[in-house]
Amino acid sequence: MKSNLLTSEKENELIVKAYAKLLRHSKSVISRDDSKVIKKAFRIALDAHKDMRRKSGEPYIFHPISVAQICVDEIGLGTTSIVAALLHDVVEDTDITLDFIEKEFGERVAKICDGLTKISGVLSPGSSIQSENFRKMLLTLVDDVRVILIKLADRLHNMRTLDSMSRGAQLKNSSETIYIYSPLAHRLGLYSIKSELDDLYLKYTEKANYKIVSKKLSETKESRDKFIRSFIRPIRKKLKSFNLKFKIIGRPKSIYSINNKMKNQNKAFEEIYDLFAIRIILDSDIKNEKTECWQAYSCVTDCYHPNPDRLKDWISTPKTNGYESLHTTVMSNSGKWVEVQIRSKRMDEIAEKGFAAHWKYKEKIKKGSQFDDWISSIRDLISQKNYSPQEFLDDFKGNLYNEEIFVFTPNGDLITLPIDSSVLDFAFSIHSELGSKCTGAKIDDKLVPIVHKLRSGDQVKIITSSKQKPSEDWLNKVVTSKAKSAIKNNINRQRKNLSSQGKELIKRKFKQLKLEFDENISKVSNYFQYKSIIEFYFDIANGTFNLKRIREYIDHLQKVKDKSKNSIIEIEIDRSKVDKKTNDEKAKLIEFQGNRDNIKYSLSKCCKPIPGDEIFGFISVNEGIKVHRTNCKNSPELLSKYAYRIIKANWYSESNIQLISSLIIDGTDRVGVIDDITKIISSQLKVNMKSINVDLNEGIFNGKIELFVSDTLQLSKLIKKLQLVPNVNNVTRLDL
């Protein structure tokens, strides 16, 4: 009893300290009256969560305090956000209602808390709770962006404390993070939070790679710091000669981005040159900051030779999320390329704290906000009623593009679009009516088709025709959600007109066959696997569906008699109904949720898992269970959008089954190098090869080897052996 009391006293002490820290860090953004409101919110949250603990064992109240702390320190939010952050879980997890919060703290706080509260209850078959919850958040976002900012703070703290969660929860949270929340942080300009979310994703999905890169960064820190000091010395001297006020920092790139470079470029850590970036931050007045940034650029290029292809001017044309900076890459005296970023203090604050900082300076810079345009596009997307949750999530994610192009109207107005945008995307960005009647465009007096991909600097004049109508194949010709939603709406209007004709046709057919229309139409539509009755009517009207096929349904009714529920083909897969039959001894390799019964499954072709890989099962609609690696390129989407179809999977083996894995190998050519490689594989390690393909080009060879291996241990042993072969440069497992 005494021990528990001591623990309680210690915890209370820590809670008070955490709360005091929050108030201390909030001083610059809150008044005396604000502190009273925050105190009230804290006491309500403390009482509401008093009996709750996190998976780590600590009192739950630490979580909302930490979320509020992130809102203050890392995003720069004020009182309303602090209060909402402290209360963000009370409606979902306790007896406190939204009405109570509105009464105590006002409508604004209540609305934010509502946007942060997850949907409960039963959803329609095939719905995704993740998609629905995200859509609900975004409904509030269009009214108050603080909903998303607090959610990002919530997600960041959850990721920071993911160690205490189960492996399944780690994978689910990490996948949601990289699929939605990291791109969203990027879109809102929260680069520091984005980088940390990316790193934490890697930490929990590719632990070995995360450890390798973080260890290498730690080991090379001293030499890297020495290089940075040497590199910035002449730049510092030059900047001082111009009487510029500045500070220079060297910041390492994120572990996630370095790991991606190693993968994409097939290079070792030591071969990646841009492990860090030099940042020059100028203390400039807003009216002088553009001029002084270019002065600083001149100083840098006076000291080092720039790469002309790597100059990026986001000061003259800021990114859609408000990001402003000059980026250049210069050659150091030691022969290494170094990225240099140049920006003002204001620009740096916006780059780090994104949307929140942008609004702080909005009145001073007197510019129109591209944030407003983006939120307006989200509002348009949300208003579309014909979207499934998954479609909505996909199209929204399409809005979170990383790269942008800048094109001009005939009048010289600037339009920002995602990279790979077509003429159609441009037309729909101006007006949905213009897009619907678009037949092509003129760019530099040259006629181009609707599918033509635009480039930055293009001046586009849209050509229209009153006879033009959007068709379904247009959806494959656009990338923006605005264009997609407008096309879908137009097609749906066309379909409704045709559908009314189709409805009349099948009504007459039902009358001939003496079938009750209202009672049977939905059953017939489901029987022929149509997602909606409207689609069914449409196919009838355009002749895709032959009405003679209705006889199939009547025969089916005859066979099942009174078992009417079986007249509908089940689209959603019930876990309990997964086919347990197998024809293949591979079934002995994997257990699902601890069950070793013979369950029908297949190994995914996109990532080719082998024993030793961390895996999960995905219940497909028609093909049983698909087994994927947790670091498969498709796993973030599957784990984020379809968590209800994920099944726990583990390797076990009662046989010596060998599975196919692929290696990529490259190096410089010499007589006998391929022979040496094949000898190690076949003779030394007794590994069977399925195929080997090697291309030779001007003394450099690149090859792909497909082998039969028993597990990752054998594969790793083989890779190490092959890397020791003279003239072999890199050997890596192929990640498709």
Image: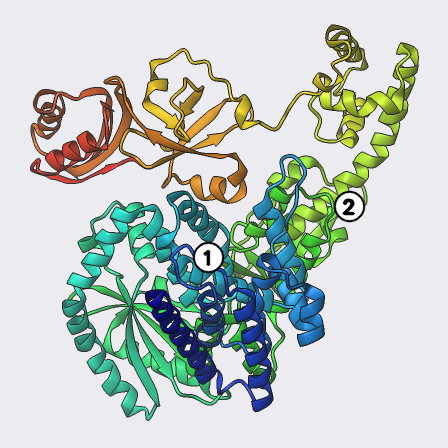
Say which mark, if any, is on residue 465: 2
Number of dots carrying numbers: 2
Q: Residue 67, percent across and down?
A: 48, 68
Residue 413 quadrant: bottom right
Q: CA distance from mark 2 to mark 1?
A: 41 Å
Residue 407, compared with residue 663, is above or below; it is below
Expressed as whole percent of the image width and height from the top left, the position of residue 658 reads: 25, 20
Give the SS element for disc 1.
Answer: helix
Question: Which residue: 71% across, 44% down?
Answer: 487
Protein image colouring: rainbow
Residue 182 - label: 1
What amino acid is at disc 1? Ser
Camera-nearest residue between 705 and 434: 705
Depth check, mark 2 against mark 1: the one in front is 1
Q: Taking 326 as reference, is 543 left or right? A: right
At 59% from the left and 45% from the top, the residue drawn is 129
Q: Measured along the vertical axis of the image, is residue 548 above or below residue 99?
A: above
Query: Does the rendering let one see residue 303?
Result: yes
Closer to the chain start, of discs 2 and 1, is 1
Q: Percent from the top left, x then y, of residue 718?
A: 15, 31
In this rendering, position of residue 394 left or right of residue 54: right
